[in-house]
Amino acid sequence: MVIHFNKKIEKSLSSKEEIKKNYTKFYKKIVIRLSELSYAKNLASIPTMKKPARKHKLSGDLKEYWSVDISPNYRLLFKPYYSNVQDESKITEIQIEKIIDDHK
């Protein structure tokens, strides 16, 4: 898939060095998740099982977002780049929005 970044997070995820500097604790897992997302043909090809990525659609205030696990608490949040596409097999571009601890 093609990955775009929200302007607020773009610099911190622009290279392995920036990821390591900004997210030292989760550096390897973020790099792996970004690689998995970039090599996937579409969103449907990202696994929904518990390990490793556990892709899932969010609900409530975050209903327009999807996420993949980075750690037990932290998630990489993204949404389809073209908001009118709903079918996972047709989502081939995403925009990374943020990394959050959704258990706070």
Image (tube, grey):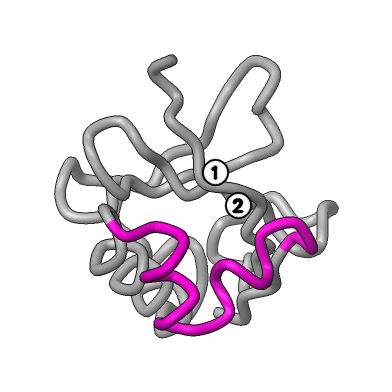
Q: Main secondary structure of the magenta part?
A: helix
Look at the image and give the residue range highlighted in magenta: 6-24
Circles 2, 1 touching at the beta carbon (< 8 Å)? yes
Position of the C terminus by quadrant: top left
Judge whether residue 9 is colored magenta. Answer: yes
Q: Which residue matches tag 2?
A: 78
- Tally of marks: 2
Residue drawn at (46%, 61%), measured in percent from left and top?
22
Label 2 residue SS = strand
Judge whether residue 75 is colored magenta. Answer: no
- Amino acid type, mark 1: Trp
Is 88 left, or right, of 11 in this rendering?
left
Q: In x, y percent, where is residue 95?
A: 68, 62
Q: In x, y percent, where is residue 5?
A: 69, 67
Instruction: Indicate which disc, 2 or 1, sits on the residue closer to the N terminus.
Output: 1
Q: In x, y percent, where is residue 14?
A: 58, 79
Position of the N terminus by quadrant: bottom right
User: Which picture quadrant has residue 11?
Assistant: bottom right
The crowding category of the residue bearing disc 2, from other C-alpha atoms within 10 Å (few below 14, some 14 to 19, many at least 20), is many
Label 1 residue SS = strand
Residue drawn at (75%, 60%), measured in percent from left and top?
6
Q: In x, y percent, where is residue 56?
A: 42, 39
Residue drawn at (76%, 63%), measured in percent from left and top?
81
Q: Which residue matches tag 1?
A: 66
